[in-house]
Image (cartoon, rainbow, N blue to C red):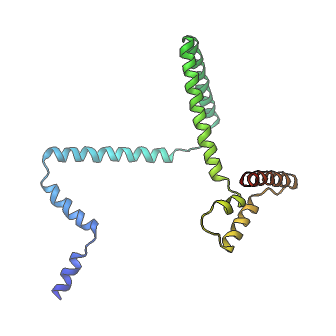
Amino acid sequence: MSGHVKVSLKKKNNKENHAEFMKKKRRTWSEEEKKSREQYRLRMMKYRERLKQKQDKNTTTTRREAKEESEREKKQADYERKYRTSLSSQKKRRIREKDAERKRIKRKTTAKSRQAKSVDSHHINTVSSKPISEEGRRKAIYRAKKSLPKSPLRFANVRSHQECNIEKEEGITR
């Protein structure tokens, strides 16, 4: 029976083992280590309190806050405009080039994410490497139909656009 007790003691979870290990280690800490541990604990308490206060605050913006934000943005734009008037033409050109490059990169990333999100059934059939089961095809069609507009005019517009895209893709693959 004592063998059984030993086995159960050995099967303690990692949390308990770690707790015992730290208990032993804390006894050997110097005064400096104890102070730094206490400072760390206090910093964490303050940090958690700040987080709680942030979460407790109402996250919706009021009209006053929105107005202040827009005023701040206007001031920033005015400052940039004044700053750029005092620059040389070469410096202005470089800034415009950097802005254009940044916008170009942003457009590429947003276009890629939009392409990844938009999936039509024709694209699913041609791209997927493994064949789709009948149930999978049925679900995909259901989801596609569900996302189509209910208005007859909008529905017709979307369908005609889809058909044009399919014709273009088929023209490319032929």
Residue nearest the observer in this picture, 147 or 102: 102
Q: Position of residue 138 (x, y in %)?
A: 71, 70
The residue under the point 18% across, 80% down is 6
Q: Position of residue 90 (x, y in %)?
A: 55, 14
The answer to whether residue 54 is left or right of residue 156 is left
Given the current orientation, which residue lies at the most extreme front position?
174
The residue under the point 59% across, 42% down is 109
The residue under the point 59% across, 37% down is 106
Q: Quadrant of the N terminus?
A: bottom left
Vertically, is 114 above or below 130? above
Residue nearest the observer in this picture, 32 or 89: 89
Residue nearest the observer in this picture, 35 or 161: 161
Quarter of the view holding residue 87: top right
Given the current orientation, which residue lies at the most extreme right position?
153
Q: Is residue 61 visible?
A: no
Q: Position of residue 157 (x, y in %)?
A: 84, 51
Q: Position of residue 64 (x, y in %)?
A: 62, 32
Q: How many marks?
A: 0
Residue nearest the observer in this picture, 82 or 104: 104
The answer to whether residue 154 is left or right of residue 133 is right
The residue under the point 71% across, 57% down is 120
Quarter of the view holding residue 92: top right
Q: Quadrant of the C terminus?
A: bottom right
Vertically, is 6 above or below 86? below
Q: Is residue 167 visible?
A: yes
